[in-house]
Image (cartoon, rainbow, N blue to C red):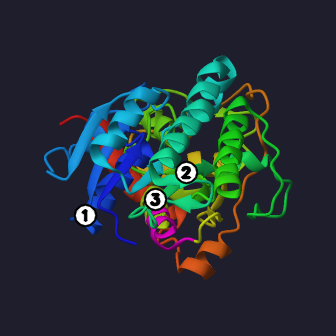
């Protein structure tokens, strides 16, 4: 599937900015228009390596602004949308759920509906030259709820979101699904496990651990630190998204996971061990680890079965947690330790 001009929503955020840099490198003849509201999570500094690329255009704006989205579709005649834009921090969704419902539900609907109207004459009737146009929706494993000690999330796992964030993402997934079943629109959804790597927002777990350690501050870990996540290196995720966009089957969902289940105490200890080796201080960084009150509705364990995308599309994660975390720490050291 060749795509001439793509709309990327939320491309100044963590995963979106990594994806744009990767995709333009792999597809130098594609034009990308990045629509981003530049909230706390989006930074233009994440896109320094592409800002002078003539095939890259940035537009500051809100995906809920239907007039703007329609104008962009008219101007650029997009042949694909890859939809990253989302409010994503669970703690923030507890404090301010309204922003999550607005961006994640209404924003997804706006993008989807405008794309449908530009690409389709009527239900199951695609406009000429739009036959290969595709809408790829990026979601999360948090829509599935929480797991016990064993088992994995598959594409058949029933949805059971437990936070306003995951509930808003579940809603957006269902809206995308409905546009396939009702209108025959060419959509694909990906649900990923926890990402980590360069450009992640400072407030997230791994950047927080690195930053606090370097600054000699207490490293806060929720509860007993036994909560488990499946960690996926962001570049591996970007490769999976590109594969799903180009070769995924219309209407399908693909789970993308790293097969790297680690609990929060292990992550903190591993980061401290790497820092003890490459930036030693008088005492081990591990002495900074402290446990704080758990957050409400904190899911115990997430883990993804990625065998469908591996088998059907040939994707596999190149990094395990131990190789990926070293690359991540190197990047953050350069960011936090100014020369």
Eyeballing the image, is 111 above or below 176? Answer: above
- The quadrant in which residue 5 appears is bottom left
Instruction: Please report the residue visible at 37 percent of the width from the left and 48 percent of the height from the top.
Output: 7
The foreground one among 193 and 109 is 109
**How far apart are the two marked residues, 3 and 1, measured between alpha carbons?**
30 Å
In the depicted structure, whether residue 320 falls above or below residue 101: below
Q: Position of residue 76 (x, y in %)?
A: 29, 46
User: In the rendering, at what x and y percent does residue 303 appear?
Assistant: 71, 59
Q: Position of residue 49 (x, y in %)?
A: 20, 49
Boundaries of the magenta span: 241-248
> Which quadrant holds residue 238?
bottom left
**3 and 2 marks in contact (CB < 8 Å):** no
Q: Nearer the viewer, residue 30 or 153?
A: 30
Image x and y of residue 182, in percent: 70, 53
As for residue 242 lying within the magenta part, the answer is yes
Report the residue marked by disc 3: 127
**Could you tell whether 16 is left or right of 22 in the image?**
right
């Amino acid at each position: 599937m060749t795509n001439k001009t793509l709309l990327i929503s939320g491309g100044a955020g963590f995963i979106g900015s990594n994806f744009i840099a990767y995709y333009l490198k792999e597809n130098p003849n594609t034009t990308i228009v990045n629509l981003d509201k530049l909230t706390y999570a989006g930074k233009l500094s994440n896109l320094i390596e592409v800002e002078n690329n003539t095939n890259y255009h940035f537009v500051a704006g809100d995906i809920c602004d239907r007039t703007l989205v329609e104008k962009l579709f008219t101007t650029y005649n997009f042949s694909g949308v890859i939809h990253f834009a989302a409010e994503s921090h669970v703690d923030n969704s507890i404090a301010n759920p309204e922003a999550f419902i607005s961006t994640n539900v209404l924003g997804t609907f706006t993008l989807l509906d405008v794309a449908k109207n530009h690409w389709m004459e009527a239900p199951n009737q695609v406009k000429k030259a739009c036959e290969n146009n595709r809408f790829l929706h990026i979601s999360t494993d948090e829509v599935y709820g929480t797991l016990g000690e064993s088992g994995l999330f598959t594409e058949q796992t029933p949805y059971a979101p437990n936070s306003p964030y995951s509930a808003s993402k579940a809603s957006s997934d269902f809206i995308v699904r409905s546009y396939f079943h009702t209108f025959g629109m060419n959509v694909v959804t990906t649900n990923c496990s926890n990402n980590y790597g360069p450009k992640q927002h400072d407030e997230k777990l791994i950047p927080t651990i690195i930053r606090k350690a370097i600054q000699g501050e207490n490293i806060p870990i929720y509860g007993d630190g036994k909560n488990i996540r499946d960690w996926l290196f962001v570049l591996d995720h970007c490769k999976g998204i590109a594969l799903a966009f180009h070769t995924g089957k219309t209407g399908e969902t693909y789970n993308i996971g790293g097969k790297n289940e680690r609990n929060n105490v292990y992550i903190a200890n591993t980061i401290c061990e790497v820092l003890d080796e490459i930036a030693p201080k008088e005492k081990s960084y591990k002495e900074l680890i402290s446990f704080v009150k758990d957050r409400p509705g904190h899911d115990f364990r997430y883990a993804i079965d990625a065998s469908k995308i591996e088998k059907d599309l040939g994707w596999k994660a190149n990094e395990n947690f131990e190789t990926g975390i070293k690359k991540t720490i190197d990047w953050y050291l350069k960011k936090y330790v100014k020369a």
